[in-house]
Amino acid sequence: SRGGGGGGGDILPGTLPDLQAFGEIDLKNISPAIGVVSNEVKYKPMSRGNEYLFDEEERERSFGEHLVFYCGSSYITGVAAGVAMGMVEGLQKGQNLPNSRLKLNAVVNACSKRAPVFGSNLGVLALMFTTSERITRYVRDSDDTLNPIIGAASTGFMFKCTSGLRACLGWTLAGGVGMTLITLTGQVHNFLYRSRIADFDVRSVMSSSTQSS
């Protein structure tokens, strides 16, 4: 297709138009992604997710959505783990039973004993964590990696607060340290991913597009 007036020329597929043909336009007023045009500043794409011009356009999951997702997925995971453990226990206990019906009954009994307990415990942990993390976020008025760490430590404290001081402190420490390791793993992954992304110089792309057209 033909470019607009002002010597725009032809626009080749996969190239940017000659924005200089439209006159003196301050690209920084159009979009931050396009507006980083100085030679000293380079634009580096985000490693994941969408980019928004205005912060209010970015929508995140609500507290209710987080609650349903974490509790549901945790309960299903706990039930699956309980079934697996119950099958192992049932097969071990049923080795000396005389017939296959009694062996199957031992497996079913073991699964029905373990699965609800594991599912309920993980569901309660997810409920406590989601609530603690959101309360911490509102109290601190900040959305950073410290919130899930505090939420995990609080979850361990609440989950074992009636089991004695040693168990309570142990679970609190385990929750905080575990979430810290998970957070650090995510940060290291993002850092390594971003380091492999070449800097995107908008000025050079615009110059090459202008020369092509």
Image (tube, rainbow, N blue to C red):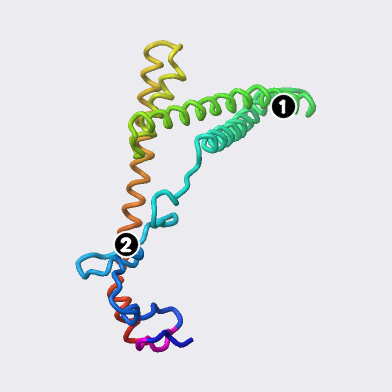
Relative image position of residue 212 (x, y in whole percent): 35, 86
Residue 99 occupies quadrant: top right
Q: Nearer the viewer, residue 179 or 148?
A: 148
Secondary structure beneath disc 2?
loop
Q: Residues within 10 Å of mark 1 (few under 14, many from 20)?
A: some
Q: Tell me if 3 is positioned left or right of 108 in this view.
A: left
Q: Nearer the viewer, residue 10 or 183?
A: 10
Please provide the residue range marked out in magenta.
6-12
How far apart are the two marked residues, 1 and 2, measured between alpha carbons?
55 Å
Q: Is residue 159 above or below residue 11?
A: above
Q: Nearer the viewer, residue 125 or 61?
A: 61
Q: Which residue is mark 2?
A: 44
**Looking at the image, do the residues carrying marks 1 and 2 touch, with CB atoms under 8 Å apart?**
no
- Per the image, is 106 magenta? no
Q: Residue at x 48, y 86 (%)?
A: 1
Quadrant of image for the C terminus: bottom left
Q: Which residue is mark 1?
A: 108
Q: Residue at x 41, y 28 (%)?
A: 135
